[in-house]
Image: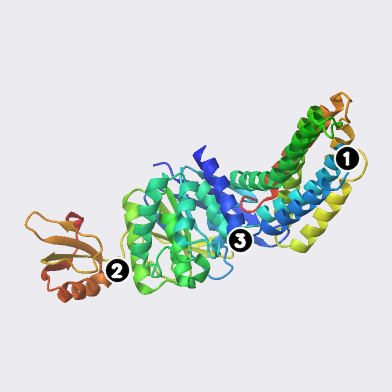
Amino acid sequence: MSRTFASVTYAWALLLSTQRWSAPALFLVGLIAWVWNTPPLSVDTVRISLLVLFALAAWLGHSAGSVEEAGQELVSTSALGSAARLLVAKWMVAAAISAVFPLVMVAGSFAWSQYRVSRGFPPLLSADQTWTSAVAVLVVAACGAAVGILVASLLPAHPGWGTGVLVLVALAQAAPGWPTVAMLTDTLPRIGQPIAPSLAVALAVGLVLTGGLLTAAVAVRRPAG
Amino acid sequence: MQPVLELSGVSKRYRRGPWVLDGVSLALEPGTLTQIRGGNGSGKSTLLRVAGGLSRPTRGSVRRDAGSLGFVPDRALPPARMTGRDYLARLGRLAGMHPAAVGPAAEAITERLGLVPGLDAPLGSLSRGNQRKVLLAQALLRPADLVVLDEPFTALDAEAATALTEVLQERLRQGATVLVALHGDELDNFGRVLALEAGAIAEAPPAVETAGSPRLRQVVVDLAGPRPEWTPGGSSLPDGRTRYLVAEADVERLLAAALAVHARVLRVAAADPEDEP
């Protein structure tokens, strides 16, 4: 457990010291703040922000996956004794950085909605919408970061090609019914609607896809591959 | 005795490129040093990566019976803005060291290797030789079961090279297994020397346990009086003398340091096993 924690703090320190986090994280904060401050605030706000989140989580995942120079990655992998563990640590850091601000916006919007309700206005986000949105944010951040990690592993010496692939995958997320973002946003409840069982299916698909992407990244990764 | 590392018929190629390793078989016994010598592109670095579990062989099998690995690649760029202290602390913790033990261990090993700017300089500001010392320090922070070093003497000054040789000898005495890739004869014929040519083990001369290198020959120096400013450790004897076991290449340096503080030199002699401090 302590080595897992050490690997996460190591990945975090690398991202901080190389400043590879700054561009995607600042874009994420700026775009999410803009989306959530564009009225009307509703579940559609969550849908758009999930699309933005996926793209920027993928960028952060790619930054985290390529943060170490190849020789240095051999050093850290040999110290930790596992390339997979190091890769998962980088994914966790990228997913966590991606998820924090959107989660703050969801929680803040719910608090604002509750305040409005107490003043006699209709709710903007229901409790059901809030928690399902929060779970959707976590799954999309995890899946987006995993895409970035996989692309960094597949194309380690080709940042241009990698960026192109990330843009294409992010755009594909807008295609109706596609996992993860479009599939999830189709199943998020509107106010007054019950939570559909298809939401659980969409979340499960997102998680399975994330696991598959990470497994593929570990398989093709050098060192280890 | 069960080998710490056993490679059986290992071949390796990257994608559809040429074969970098071609049917390499190798077994390393615990507490031994093996040198792999070869020219540029002979496959040394790939062999060491496969041996360290950092690259999978295309064919053949690798069996490792080592709990911990200290590894230094032929080249690596550590994070430029991180200080040496932070870097070694994080890598030590990755390797499972207790946080309280990492700092003193890092101080000790970098002092021995002669990291002149100290541990608080950003790694990007260090010279190539000093960056190399930090990389070596992370591999030698703790007594690893298997130590794999790719061109460890590259860019090191003579004193650091001698210190590294001494540290490797200590690790061997502690039971570590050491695998080193070299261009030349920096370690003379110490341990087992294998030549790698075009990805294949070309020859396997008989093992030579000790060598005639000034870096490897040990000398006993007994001193009395003030402690010199520079010493390679030393142990106090009951009669008040201090005994130092030094590499022959360092004798002159120790004697100069002793004379500088007016210490008395009581004995200078070739070491035998009973002289071990």
Tell me residue B268's x, y (percent).
15, 69
User: Looking at this rendering, what residue extends furthest in the front direction?
Assistant: A119
Tell me residue B263's x, y (percent).
12, 70
* Left-right relation of A211 to A8: right
Q: Is residue A199 positioned above or below B146 on the image?
A: above
The residue that disc 3 covers is A18
Q: Nearer the viewer, mark 3 or mark 2?
A: 3
Q: Chain of mark 1?
A: A
**Camera-side residue: B274 or B221?**
B221
The residue that disc 1 covers is A44
User: Looking at this rendering, what residue extends furthest in the left direction?
Assistant: B239
Q: Is residue A209 positioned above or below A63 on the image?
A: above
The residue that disc 2 covers is B212
Tell me residue A136's x, y (percent).
78, 36
Q: Nearer the viewer, mark 1 or mark 3?
A: 1
Is residue A200 visible to us here? yes
CA distance separating discs 2 and 1: 78 Å
Residue at left offset 73%, top offset 49%: A150
Residue at left offset 39%, top offset 73%: B157
Q: Residues within 10 Å of mark 2 (few under 14, many from 20)?
A: few
